[in-house]
Image (cartoon, coloured by chain):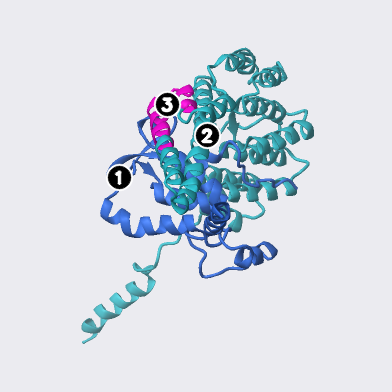
C-alpha cells in the first residue's frame, strides 16, 4: 500500500518542481536588436514596415540616443516609398526639434531632397539654399550646393548649374564630381531643342506644321486632315444656309484648331524634356546621402542611398 | 436678320459648353468646403458642361460597344474628363484634341510605355501634358 502511494507522490513532487513545459517563452529585445531589425527591414526595401519598426523603437526606447536617427530614417522610408508628404512632415518636425544640430540640417536637406525626387525643383532649391546658408561649416553645405547644381540642370539653366558646381569646396568628397559636372553641364546648351513658340506659330499658320517641326509627321498629318475637314464642313454649312450646323461646327473647329496649336507646343516641350532627361541620365550623380549623422559633422556612411 | 439668328445660335452653344454662370461653382468659390453629390468625374469646379456630359455619354454607351482601342493610359475619355475637371471646359477640350492627335506611336518616343491589363500602353496622364504651364501649389515654406 505504501509502495503504491509512493510512486504517484514522487511523480507529483517531480512535476511540482519541474519548470512548466508549456510555459510561454519570453524574450527580451534590447534597443540594439530593435534598431538593427528596423534597419534590416528598411534595407530589404520594406519601407512602410520599417517605419513601424522604427516607431516601435522610439516607443520602447524613448531615451535612446538613436531616436533622432530613427526619426530621420522614418522620413527616409516614407521618401523611398514615394509618400513625400509624410516624409516632409517627419523632416519638418525633426528640423524644428534639432535646428541647431547636424541632424536638423540633414532633415532640412532631405526636405529639399523630397521635392527634388518629386520633380518640384523650385521648392527643392529653396531648401538647399537654406541648408547652405544655415550649416556653412559642414559637408551638408557641399551636398546642398551640389544638389542646387542638379536642380539648375533639371530646369535647363546650364550656365548657372556650371557656376554652382564650381562652388563645391575642394576638400569635399563631391569635389571631383562637381568639377566634372561644371564642365559637362555646359553641353546641355547645345542639345537640339525645339522652340515651343515656333511650333505654336507654325501650327497656327498651317495645322499640322508645328508637329512636323517637332519631327512628329504622322501627328502632323492627322492634325492637318482633321482641321481641314472641319474647316471645310463649316464653310460649306454657311454657304448652304445651314447656320445652326455652321455655328456648332465653328465651336468644334475652333476646338480642333486651338487643340492643334496646344498639341504642337506640347510636343516641343515633351521633345525638350526627353532630350534633357537623356542627357542628365548620362551624367554621374555622386551624391550619397548617409543616413546617420555623426558628431564629426560628416555624413554617416553606415547606410547610404544613391539618388 | 441672318446676323441676329447667328448671334442667338452662338450664344446658345456658348452657354451649353460653358455651363450656367453661378450656381454650385459660384457657391463653391465662396466656400470651397461645399460638397455636392455630383462631385464625380463628370463635374469639376466648372459645374455642369456639355463637354463632360458628351464624354460621359461616349464612355458609358459607345465605348463599351466600340471596344477598348485607346493605346494610352488613362483612356482618352477618362483623360478628357480629368482634363476638363482640372482645367475647365476650353482648356480641357484643347487637351483632349491634343491627346487624340498625339496618341499614335510617335508618342512612345517621349512618354513611357507600361504594361497594363495584358497590353503595353502609353502612360500619358494629364500631368504629362500640362507640366510646362501648370504647377500645383506646392509652397510649403514655413
Please state, as top left, top right, bottom left or bottom right, where the C terminus of chain A lies in the image. top right
**Nearer the camera: disc 3 or disc 2:** 2
Magenta region: A209-227
According to the image, label 3 marks what residue? A216
Q: Colour of chain A?
A: cyan
Q: Disc number at residue B69?
A: 1
Residue at 58 percent of width and 58 percent of height: B46
Q: Colour of chain B?
A: blue
Cα separation, mark 3 vs mark 2, equals: 14 Å
Q: Is residue B138 left or right of residue A269?
A: right
Dot 3, crowdedness within 10 Å: few (<14), some or many (≥20)?
Answer: many
Residue at 40 percent of width and 31 percent of height: A219
Q: How far across and how far down the image is residue A42, in percent?
A: 49, 43
Classify mark 3: helix, strand or loop. loop
Residue at 71 percent of width and 42 percent of height: A104
Q: Is residue B110 above or below residue B137?
A: above
Q: How far across and how far down the image is residue A180, in percent?
A: 60, 13
As for residue A224 lying within the magenta part, the answer is yes
Q: Earlier in the sequence, mark 3 or mark 2?
A: 3
Q: Is residue B107 left or right of residue A115?
A: left
Residues indicated by labels 3 and 1 sit on the same polypeptide chain: no
Q: Is residue B62 above or below residue A299?
A: below
Amino acid at each position: 500500500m505504501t509502495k503504491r502511494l509512493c510512486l504517484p507522490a514522487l511523480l507529483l513532487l517531480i512535476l511540482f518542481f519541474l519548470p512548466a513545459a508549456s510555459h510561454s517563452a519570453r524574450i527580451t529585445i534590447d534597443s540594439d536588436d530593435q534598431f538593427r531589425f528596423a534597419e534590416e527591414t528598411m534595407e530589404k526595401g520594406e519601407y512602410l514596415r520599417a517605419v513601424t519598426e522604427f516607431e516601435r523603437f522610439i516607443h520602447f526606447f524613448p531615451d535612446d540616443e538613436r531616436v533622432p536617427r530613427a526619426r530621420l530614417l522614418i522620413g527616409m522610408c516614407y521618401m523611398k516609398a514615394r509618400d513625400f508628404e509624410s516624409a516632409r512632415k517627419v523632416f519638418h518636425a525633426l528640423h524644428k526639434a534639432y535646428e541647431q544640430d547636424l541632424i536638423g540640417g540633414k532633415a532640412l536637406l532631405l526636405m529639399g531632397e523630397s521635392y527634388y525626387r518629386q520633380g518640384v525643383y523650385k521648392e527643392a532649391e529653396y531648401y538647399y539654399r537654406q541648408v547652405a546658408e544655415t550649416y556653412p561649416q559642414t559637408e551638408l553645405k557641399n551636398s546642398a550646393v551640389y544638389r542646387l547644381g542638379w536642380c539648375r540642370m533639371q530646369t535647363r539653366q546650364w550656365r548657372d548649374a556650371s557656376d554652382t558646381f564650381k562652388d563645391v569646396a575642394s576638400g569635399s568628397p563631391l569635389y571631383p564630381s562637381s568639377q566634372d559636372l561644371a564642365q559637362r553641364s555646359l553641353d546641355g546648351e547645345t542639345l537640339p531643342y525645339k522652340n515651343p513658340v515656333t511650333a505654336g506659330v507654325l501650327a497656327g499658320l498651317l495645322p499640322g506644321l508645328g508637329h512636323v517641326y517637332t519631327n512628329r509627321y504622322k501627328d502632323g498629318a492627322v492634325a492637318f486632315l482633321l482641321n481641314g475637314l472641319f474647316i471645310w464642313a463649316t464653310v460649306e454649312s454657311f454657304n448652304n444656309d445651314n447656320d445652326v450646323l455652321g455655328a456648332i461646327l465653328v465651336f468644334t473647329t475652333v476646338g480642333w484648331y486651338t487643340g492643334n496649336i496646344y498639341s504642337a507646343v506640347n510636343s516641343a516641350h515633351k521633345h525638350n524634356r526627353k532630350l534633357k532627361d537623356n542627357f542628365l541620365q548620362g551624367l554621374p550623380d555622386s551624391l550619397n546621402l548617409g543616413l546617420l549623422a555623426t558628431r564629426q559633422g560628416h555624413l554617416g556612411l553606415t547606410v547610404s542611398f544613391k539618388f | 436678320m441672318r446676323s441676329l439668328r447667328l448671334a442667338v445660335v452662338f450664344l446658345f452653344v456658348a452657354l451649353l459648353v460653358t455651363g450656367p454662370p453661378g450656381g454650385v461653382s459660384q457657391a463653391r468659390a465662396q466656400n470651397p468646403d461645399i460638397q455636392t453629390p455630383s462631385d464625380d468625374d463628370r463635374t469639376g469646379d466648372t459645374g455642369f458642361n456639355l463637354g463632360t456630359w458628351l464624354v460621359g455619354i461616349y464612355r458609358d454607351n459607345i465605348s463599351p460597344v466600340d471596344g477598348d482601342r485607346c493605346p494610352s493610359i488613362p483612356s482618352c475619355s477618362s483623360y478628357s474628363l480629368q482634363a476638363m475637371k482640372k482645367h475647365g471646359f476650353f482648356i480641357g477640350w484643347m487637351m483632349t484634341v491634343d491627346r487624340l492627335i498625339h496618341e499614335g506611336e510617335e508618342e512612345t518616343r517621349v512618354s513611357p510605355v507600361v504594361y497594363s491589363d495584358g497590353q503595353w500602353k502609353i502612360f500619358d496622364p494629364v500631368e504629362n501634358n500640362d507640366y510646362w504651364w501648370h504647377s500645383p501649389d506646392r509652397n510649403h515654406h514655413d
